[in-house]
Image (cartoon, coloured by chain):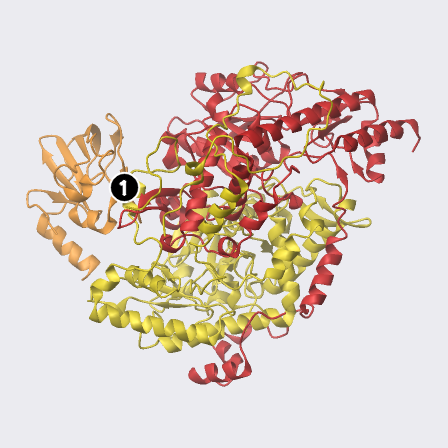
Chain colours: A red, B yellow, C orange
Amino acid sequence: MDFTPHTEADLAEMLAAMGLSRTADLFEHIPADLRLNRPLDIAPGLCEPDLRARVAAIASRNRAETLSFVGAGAYQHFVPAAVDALASRSEFATAYTPYQPEVSQGTLQAIFEFQTVSAILLGTEIANASMYDGASAAAEAVLMALRLGAREERRTVYLARSLHPAVRQTIATYASDLEGVVLREIPFGADGRLDLVSLQEEGIPACIVAGHPNFFGVVEDLRVASSWARARGALLVSVTLEPLALGWLTPPGALGADIAVAEGQGLGLPVAWGGPGVGLFGTREKFLRAMPGRLVGETVDMEGRRAFCLTLSTREQHIRREKATSNICTNHSLCALAFTICVSLLGPRGLQDLARINARKLRYAVGKMRESGLSEVFSGPTFNESVLRGPGAAERWEKLLRRGIVAGLPLGRWYPELGDAILLCATDAHRRTDVDRLASEWSAANAGRA
Amino acid sequence: MTDERLIFEGSAPGRRGASLPGDDVPPEITLSDLEPELCRPGTEMLPELSELDVVRHYTRLSQWNFSIATNFYPLGSCTMKYNPIVNEWAARLPGFAGIHPMWPAPLVQGALALCVELEAMLAEVSGMDAVTLTPAAGAQGEFVGIKMIRAHHVRAGRARRKVLIPASAHGTNPATSALCGYDVVEIPVGSDGLVHLGDVAPQVDDDVAAIMITNPNTLGLFEPEIGAIAKAVHEKGGLVYIDGANMNALCGISRPGDIGADVLHINLHKTFSTPHGGGGPGAGPVCVKKILEPYLPVPRVHRAEGGFELSEDQPHSIGRVRTFQGNFGMLVRAFTYMSALGGDGITRMSERAVLNANYLRERLRGTLAIAQDQPCLHECVFTDQAFAGTGVKTLDIAKRLLDFGFHSPTIYFPLVVAGALMIEPTETESRETLDAFVAVMQTIVAEAASDPERLTGAPYRTRVRRLDETRAARKPVLRWRPGTGTDGESD
Amino acid sequence: MEFPEELKYTRDHEWVSIEGDVATVGITDHAQHELGDVVFVELPAVGDKVEKAEAFGVVESTKAVSDVFAPIGGEVAEVNDGLPDSPELLNEDPYGDGWMVKIKLAGALDGADLMTASEYRAYLEESVGS
């Protein structure tokens, strides 16, 4: 396929207009020793039918139809058909960043609506125009807390061990080259919640980072974390990787989170092997100037009409250069749009009902798996994921995989003391019969031998 | 045409827009015991709308957007080429859209194979040894690149303190360096718009971790001394980061890896046609030479029994930079595009991009003053000299273009050119479009002399006219709140 | 462009007015003109110590951001509390209501690199051009 429109006549006339005879003349000025003097070693181009056959063949080598009970930061939920139909409109998808607001009011108003929806769901006063994903948003939140605490030399960051391992790892990567910054883990208790009592404190804290719910699906009582942080002059950062939980739980901002971040994929975006997602980022109005990322603001045009534009860009890299709050240059605008459309279609009742369906489905699944010999590890309340353990769980998980079922996520890889445990997720995408099948296959896997 | 209300302003209590799946578990199943204060969702302020309300709202909003699908963007440095629709078809295949990032390898061999092939194609285009597809954007790619450079130096004994960056560089370059703990040393750009070895060499010592350089540079010019500059930095143990934002100029022509790059990032949403989406998502793969391979972020794709697998087994990796392995949906699009074009097509893409840019440079000669009158690559920079003394500024020209149905070019960048207009047509624009653009520019520049006030008041034909951006920054209003007055009606 | 005769000026475009051991500091008409509409001002706290040539505050417009440097060293005695809520004062009245801080000098004044109004005007002409 070739997307260039040049005919032979075009080429001839354009070259003539420039006083050149061949396209190769355009590159004469490049020193010969810096030129590639052979064709690219890449297979030749394809016509559209062959291209589609090739790509479809690759796609078919993925077993997308597998019955899966994995969440762990990426969630399969019902998404109304209208979401993709609207978000995929070329006028949204192929638009540039709205630097010329007069011709970008579509994108700008939609993102203003996203900022509002984010702030509402997170329970914060303000929210930005989105970040890449939940983990990078969490890392940026930690950097922001460190900036705010710089004057008081706050350099310790407490990370809940019950946070998604990828979130902790990402924060570690972002903080690794910052002088004097110390990362410390907060253990979890038998209830799966933060165990601040056993925590060995060190240094002056900038922030404490906790999940809402956490990686184990357990709902923290963020008020405890908030008081703990407040007493030490530190900030509370909350991380919500399952956005649907916000249809059931009190928003983190209302429980004391100073910075609340979330992954929005679960509401409106396909699972798509983990990306692109969308990071929600909300905070208090007083921290506005320390907040990274793009912002859309409301104003008027010269004739008094309400209009929207990118604003407070002076925090960003293209103006502040080495003094920027972050180097982030993009938001995940189109994903933020899909998220907003999905939430608009679901509405408050729909979000709450869908959340309830998920929570009850998980409780049903836990009950059925209990009958098959597993028990819940943590006593704390859960949303749509829970950690279950039983003897030989890892082996049975393997057997079920061979039978085309992913029975949750084995946790031994990240939590050695949970080597016989799996993180099980049940959502509205599972029918009751799917859960029944999971449970009966699990039981059967025990009865048989290898 | 009336203004569009915000979705919150059209809300009617009780309206429903979605048809939910049923709750098929037995009624006696109860929820987890949760403290009452913890289950009061803050959803009341969300709007209650019918599906038709939502469809109309977002359809109307979309109609106020300029987009590649509607018209030409001459935006320098952004590479606003056509976003092929077949890429959208590919990304939506259930085999790609419906796979979970944490599934075991046997279930996702297609995704893994696609990544391996895409990495190979990018490595070939860039002349490098290894690739990571993880970074979500060019800026995150830069972050990964500089962190890897730092990791390399730390492992060699000393992090070093400085990064050299030309004054013509994009703002992400110094911001990224600062984010990674480096001091930025600015290298002056010559009056010819180029970076000279003579300006770089005095700054190179064994405390320089790297030089970050863009090629072609932000004036659209190939840096002829880049080979010598890379050598000078290497001699003192420093590394060379090439900003690959302008790769559309050089695919199949010149490879950063052959001229001294140790690491570069590529913007898939520029060179490889993935859509900009109004600001994102994009993807910023990073390509490295063997010397930096140990530090690539995890996870990486490795060969395994039966095919491929993701692995975190990289002892010197800089670590994870995100939750999962990459903006996979964008990788599928770029892979589809590169497969569609093939090696021959990719080279033709760059050749025609450069052809179009030089054609514009030639046709606009006499209308606009060229910043550096020498052969450019895929973009060309003009100064504001042609309308000096009229009271008309570059911004006014940019706004007036909107009245004629074109998007503005990139303006006031690079900073080293006064009142810069940076124009990059890309290879997917036809001669007719370019000629039409030239004609409009001629009209507008003539207007600057004959009727400057017409320009300073532009645009006139867009949905809204010039915005009070000062007000937006002085009194930030960043969200809707219930009870806020306006119903969106104009006047 | 206005440059009141009774003030002194720095190369970083601040003005200083010294009475006894207290120096009042702000940004010049040239600085506010270059910045454009000021949208945000960050000032130090009363009691903060500042060193000569060290940044004590930040001024932001819609298109640029600039550190403000202390022309002399000392302790911040007073800040213009009205400025954060009305940043436009820096554009409208940079030498009057747009004053930024009053610094109590730490020891003798080191005024070697402070310029007079005509020296500053000449400096602008040669460095900035037409």
Describe the element under mark 1 as helix, strand or loop. Answer: strand
Q: Residue B449 at x, y = what percent?
A: 21, 70
Q: Check the image and name the residue furthest to the left.
A: C5
- Residue displayed at 45% across by 23% down: A234
What amino acid is labelled 1 in the image?
Answer: Val
Q: Residue B109 at x, y = what percent?
A: 76, 50
Can the viewer see residue A163 in this picture?
no
Give the vertical position of B366 relative to A249 (above or below).
below
Q: Residue C61 at x, y = what percent?
A: 28, 45
Which sits in the foreground, C68 or B5? B5
Give the image quarter of residue B455.
bottom left
Can the viewer see residue B287 in this picture?
yes
- Residue displayed at 65% across by 68% down: B342
Give the vertical position of A159 relative to B304 (above or below).
above
Give the image quarter of residue C72.
top left
Which sits in the foreground, A19 or A433? A433
Crowd class of label 1 (few under 14; some 14 to 19; many from 20; radius 10 Å): many
Q: Is residue A224 left or right of residue A42?
A: left
Placement of the N terminus of chain A among the 4 image quadrants = bottom right
Give the vertical position of B4 relative to B21 (above or below).
below
Chain letter, disc 1 residue = C
Q: Residue A79 at x, y = what percent?
A: 62, 41
Residue holding disc 1: C39
Q: Is residue C3 left or right of residue A115?
A: left
